[in-house]
């Protein structure tokens, strides 16, 4: 196209003269197309995320009624109650159990993901399906299966006493160890899959170059593989820590209610105490922790990503 066709004469109406629609019409068409494609997702987020979050935020500002419910008088008492030693201990216990589960999941999940990433393609697919298979079963059924395994007359105690390792059944159920076991079993795939994706993306030539320079496998892993998979480690840790922190089913079933986590506390405030404002404040605190973790994970991934490109 010649330059004379790109320049409109003075006083001519805006828009190209090559048969295309005017620029403003094209912009309106692009905006309409974006709205059509983004509309369902935005509507979903608006109805199921932003509106409930606004209600939770609103409830935190009001008082509990004498017989439960909400009295629409503003107060900051709900936020000061978060630091009450009784509730603060529950939060600390929740963080401790969730962090311990995340650490064990990382120690178990990293070698698992590493081995899967190095398998032949056919066996790699089979291993990934085996990792995901537990998600095909109902969550409650999987949790109750651990009751059968860990109870006094359960299969594990029968195996221990039958082989003579112990003289009497061990107390494997209704304690924090059982809670960590249940959380680890339920959320371990959420650690393995991001780690597998991070290890799978590694360029094999980097490890070959490290070996050619005389580095042993352990040095290659510590200096090349591990630093380059930090974004996957952070993603897996967030994916495991957050649902562990808010879980209330596993502490109830496998912990027997002896170790209360923040998820149980939120449920009790809504369903038993009917203290909606304080329950909403606890839920908002968990959401705040989630948002902070996501920002930290995004920041660390960006920093390590820039380091890799540099």
Image: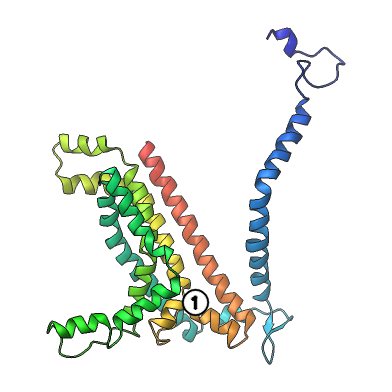
Q: Is residue 92 visible?
A: no
Which quadrant is home to the N terminus? top right
Kindly identify the residue that appears in the image at 47 percent across and 86 percent down. Answer: 86
| Residue 63 at x, y percent in the picture | 68, 83
| Position above or below: 183 against 109 | below
Kindly identify the residue that appears in the image at 56 percent across and 73 percent down. Answer: 283
| Residue 16 at x, y percent in the picture | 77, 18
Q: Is residue 143 visible?
A: yes
Kindly identify the residue that appears in the image at 43 percent across and 60 percent down. Answer: 239
The reply, left or right, for residue 225 in relation to residue 252 is left
The residue lying toward the viewer, choosing from 48 and 304, is 48
The residue lying toward the viewer, choosing from 81 and 297, is 297
Quadrant of the rendered image containing residue 241: bottom left
The reply, left or right, for residue 205 in relation to residue 244 is left
Instruction: Assign a secondary structure to mark 1.
Output: helix
Q: Which residue position is annotated with label 1?
A: 263
| Residue 111 at x, y percent in the picture | 25, 56
Kindly identify the residue that appears in the image at 75 percent across and 15 percent down. Answer: 18
| Position above or below: 176 against 121 | below
Quadrant of the rendered image containing residue 242: bottom left
Which quadrant is home to the C terminus? top left
| Position above or below: 34 against 157 | above
């Amino acid at each position: 196209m010649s330059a004379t066709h790109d320049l409109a004469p003075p006083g001519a109406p805006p828009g190209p003269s090559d048969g295309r629609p005017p620029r403003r019409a094209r912009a309106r068409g692009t905006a309409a197309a974006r709205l059509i494609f983004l509309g369902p997702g935005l509507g979903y987020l608006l109805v199921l995320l932003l509106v409930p979050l606004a209600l939770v935020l609103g409830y935190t500002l009001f008082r509990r009624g004498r017989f439960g419910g909400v009295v629409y008088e503003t107060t900051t008492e709900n936020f000061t109650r978060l630091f009450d030693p009784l509730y603060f201990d529950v939060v600390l216990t929740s963080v401790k159990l969730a962090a311990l589960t995340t650490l064990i999941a990382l120690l178990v999940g990293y070698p698992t993901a590493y081995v899967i990433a190095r398998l032949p393609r056919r066996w790699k697919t089979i291993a990934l399906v085996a990792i995901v298979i537990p998600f095909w079963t109902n969550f409650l059924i999987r949790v109750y299966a651990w009751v059968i395994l860990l109870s006094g007359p359960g299969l594990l105690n029968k195996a221990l006493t039958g082989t003579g390792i112990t003289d009497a059944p061990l107390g494997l159920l209704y304690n924090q160890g059982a809670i960590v076991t249940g959380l680890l079993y339920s959320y371990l795939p959420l650690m393995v899959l991001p780690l597998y994706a991070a290890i799978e993306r590694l360029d094999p030539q980097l490890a070959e170059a490290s070996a050619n320079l005389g580095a042993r496998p352990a040095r290659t892993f510590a200096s090349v593989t591990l630093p380059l998979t930090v974004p996957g480690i952070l993603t897996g840790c967030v994916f495991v820590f957050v649902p562990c922190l808010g879980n209330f089913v596993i502490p109830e079933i496998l912990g027997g209610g002896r170790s209360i986590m923040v998820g149980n506390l939120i449920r009790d405030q809504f369903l038993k105490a009917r203290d909606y404002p304080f329950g909403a404040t606890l839920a908002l605190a968990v959401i705040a922790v989630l948002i902070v973790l996501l920002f930290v994970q995004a920041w660390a991934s960006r920093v390590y990503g820039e380091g890799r490109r540099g």
